[in-house]
Amino acid sequence: MIQYLAKDYTGDPFVLFDSAHLTALGIVALFILSIFFLRRVQNQKLRKAIRYGLAGLLIVNEIARHAWLIYYRQWSIQWNLPLHLCSIFVWLSIIMLIARNYAIFEFAYFLGIGGALQPLLTPDAGIYGFPHFYPIQLFISHGSIIAAAVYMAVVEGYRPHWSSIKKVFAWGNVYLVFVTVINLLIGSNYLYTLHKPHVATLLDYLGPWPWYLVSAEIVALLIFLLLYSPYLIGDRRAMRPS
């Protein structure tokens, strides 16, 4: 059992889209889809228990990740500050779930879901294949970020608006500039603003630095519009005369 927590893992490495990866994606998808069965839950105590349970899962999972990194002396400010989108949305999602914060929901719906999809499809797991702790923690973290936003939308009835897209895009770029400054100061590469990651990602198809940053902005807008499309369709149907 201890081998599945070891830093020097001797098992099979992670392989993109092999049976283990596809199975993990399927489990995450089923977990998120199961939230839609909770739409009719009216009991506020049960809703609170679900929200707090999901927040607790995020907390325990994230603490476990940092504990593992610290134990093996792998933790550093260049790699492990909560500055990547998914790292910061772990904590923002926790606050959103506990406080039912709509302002965070606007960002979690677009940036949280959009940001977490990429690591699920192309995770940076390296030598750590399933059932090692590292990829399991990664899938729980990113799957729960998406689940948190979906829960607030489906069960709590929160929804984004056109103004949400403008707000998220504008403040997202402010955050991008802020993180780039941090990267230059401490020699990190959060949000990959200084160079591409060393594993295969969508950025590989978006051109060289710095042009992939511009291309990523266009992709982000397209993802925002795709995520907003169910509400756009619903609003148009509601406006049709009966």
Image: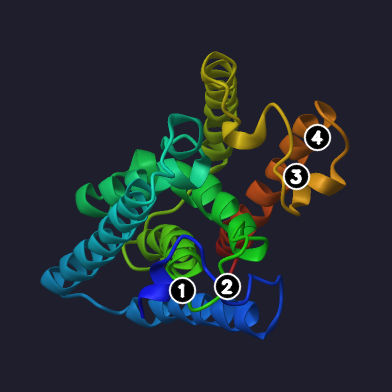
Earlier in the chain: of badge 2 and badge 1, it is 1
Amino acid under disc 1? Ile
State whether residue 232 appears in this view. Answer: no
Sequence-wise, the earlier of marks 3 and 1 is 1
* Disc assigned to residue 32: 1
Q: Which of 151 and 80 is in front in this view?
A: 80
Q: Which residue is drawn at 81% across and 36% down?
A: 215
Between disc 4 and disc 1, the foreground one is 4
**At numbered mark 3, what does the secondary structure look like: helix, strand or loop?**
helix
Residue that protrudes farthest toward the left in the picture: 45
Secondary structure beneath dot 2 equals: loop
Q: What residue type is labelled 3?
A: Val
Q: Residue 184 carries which label?
A: none
Q: Residue 35's spot in the image, x, y percent?
A: 39, 76
Residue ID for mark 4: 212
Of the pair 11 and 123, the residue shown nearer to us: 11
Q: Quadrant of the C terminus?
A: bottom right
The answer to whether 154 is drawn above or below residue 71 in the figure is below
Q: Distance between the residues labelled 4 and 2?
A: 29 Å
* Residue 183 occupies quadrant: top right
The amino acid beneath tag 4 is Tyr
Give the class, few, some or many, for how many residues have Cα within 10 Å of label 2's Cα (few <14, many ≥20): many
Q: What residue type is labelled 2?
A: Gly
How much space separates mark 2 and mark 1, taking CA atoms? 23 Å
Q: Give the side of residue 66 with respect to residue 123, left or right.
A: left
2 left or right, relative to 139: left
Circle 3 residue: 219
